[in-house]
Image: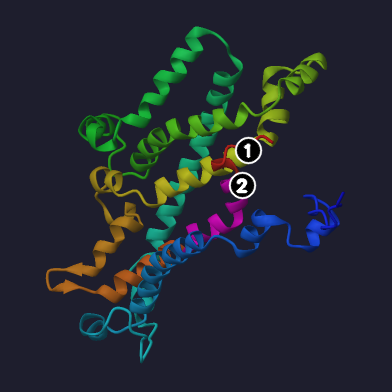
């Protein structure tokens, strides 16, 4: 009778298995995913190349931008284009845009937070119907209602004012804001509401002391989304304003377009300067923005 003297294979999870490499799954984890890495590299190139071209061309002279290669490194970089932009009333455009963005964000947050709270906490059919009707605004493009909106703004006496930009921008931002905030507020556990209710807290106190602190990620997401809508808006400023003193950045780019041509480096320099403020806002709130988009704002 013979005995098998071959060593037994190490069990998964044992020290011997760990020393031998941990199996195919661990070896794949060490090697990584080449396709994912390649895709990330391609996406990085797609994002970085336009940004590099934008900054590089803004440092060129007009003749170099027209005749040179778009990806070429500027041989004689100059800041004259940025001086031209700053001397052309850029700070006034920036101030108007900042006012529009700040007031729009404030209106959206003040109105959408209570609406989302009521939609989450109220169980009636009427509340559900009102919430679904409110979200129909997501499916309505601004271009479809620009003519009646123009007439309404004119009747209200707000034509050619910053309010003519702020109010429609806030209105079209609110459906998405309510949708994001309602999803965030649903993550707040029912036990917390019950505990505060036993302490005699009113619904307003629950909203201010419980829901708002636990919904910071969703609120940050809504704030950045609304700020982007206001900062990059073009249709409402184009149709609902006319005078130079009420122009915003998106319309101010026309200052560098004349009947004799377009000052391409100056336009690109203006774009670079207009991107910097909103990019800084994103850097400050990027963690909360990512958490809010992932739907984990209340946890």
The Cα atoms of the two marked residues, 2 and 1, are separated by 8 Å
Please identify the residue farthest to the bottom as the structure is shown: 75
Occupied quadrant, residue 162: top left
Q: Is residue 288 above or below residue 109?
A: below
225 vs 118, left or right, is: left
Q: Residue at x 30, y 69 (%)?
A: 267
Front-lying residue, 174 or 292? 292
Could you say where residue 69 lies in the image, as x and y percent from the top left?
27, 82
- Asked whether residue 284 is drawn in magenta, I would say yes
Occupied quadrant, residue 254: bottom left
Q: Residue at x 62, y 41 (%)?
A: 217
Mark 2 residue crowding within 10 angstroms, few (<14) / some (14–19) / many (20+): many
Q: Earlier in the sequence, mark 2 or mark 1?
A: 2
Q: Is residue 54 above or below residue 92?
A: below
191 vs 3, left or right, is: left
- Asked whether residue 208 is drawn in magenta, I would say no
Residue topped by disc 1: 297
Looking at the rendering, the stretch of residues picked out in magenta corresponds to 276-290
Could you say where residue 246 lies in the image, as x and y percent from the top left?
33, 52
Q: Residue at x 79, y 59 (%)?
A: 18
Q: Residue at x 62, y 51 (%)?
A: 287
Occupied quadrant, residue 214: top right
Mark 1 residue crowding within 10 angstroms, few (<14) / some (14–19) / many (20+): many
Could you say where residue 152 lies in the image, as x and y percent from the top left?
26, 29
Residue topped by disc 2: 288
């Amino acid at each position: 009778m013979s005995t098998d003297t071959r060593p037994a294979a190490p069990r998964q999870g044992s020290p011997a298995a760990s020393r031998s490499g941990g199996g195919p799954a661990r070896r794949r984890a060490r090697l990584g995913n080449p396709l994912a890495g390649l895709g990330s590299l391609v996406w990085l190139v797609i994002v970085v190349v336009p940004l590099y071209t934008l900054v590089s061309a803004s440092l060129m002279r007009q003749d170099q931008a027209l005749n040179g290669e778009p990806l070429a490194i500027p041989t004689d970089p100059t800041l004259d284009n940025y001086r031209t932009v700053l001397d052309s009333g850029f700070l006034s455009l920036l101030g108007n845009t900042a006012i529009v963005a700040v007031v729009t964000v404030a209106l959206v947050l003040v109105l959408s937070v209570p609406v989302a709270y009521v939609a989450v906490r109220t169980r009636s059919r009427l509340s559900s119907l009102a919430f679904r009707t409110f979200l129909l605004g997501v499916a309505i493009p601004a271009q479809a209602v620009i003519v009646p909106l123009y007439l309404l703004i004119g009747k209200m006496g707000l034509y050619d004012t910053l309010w003519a930009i702020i109010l429609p921008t806030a209105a079209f931002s609110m459906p998405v804001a309510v949708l994001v905030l309602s999803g965030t507020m649903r993550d707040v556990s029912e036990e917390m509401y019950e505990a505060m209710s036993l302490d005699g807290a009113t619904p307003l106190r629950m909203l201010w002391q419980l829901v708002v602190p636990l919904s910071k990620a969703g609120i940050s997401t809504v704030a950045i989304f609304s700020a982007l809508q206001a900062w990059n808006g073009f249709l409402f400023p184009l149709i609902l304003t006319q005078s130079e003193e009420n122009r915003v950045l998106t319309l101010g780019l026309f200052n560098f377009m004349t009947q004799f041509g377009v000052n391409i480096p100056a336009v690109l320099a203006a774009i670079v300067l207009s991107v910097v403020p909103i990019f800084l806002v994103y850097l400050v709130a990027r963690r909360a923005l990512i958490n809010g988009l992932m739907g984990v704002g209340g946890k």
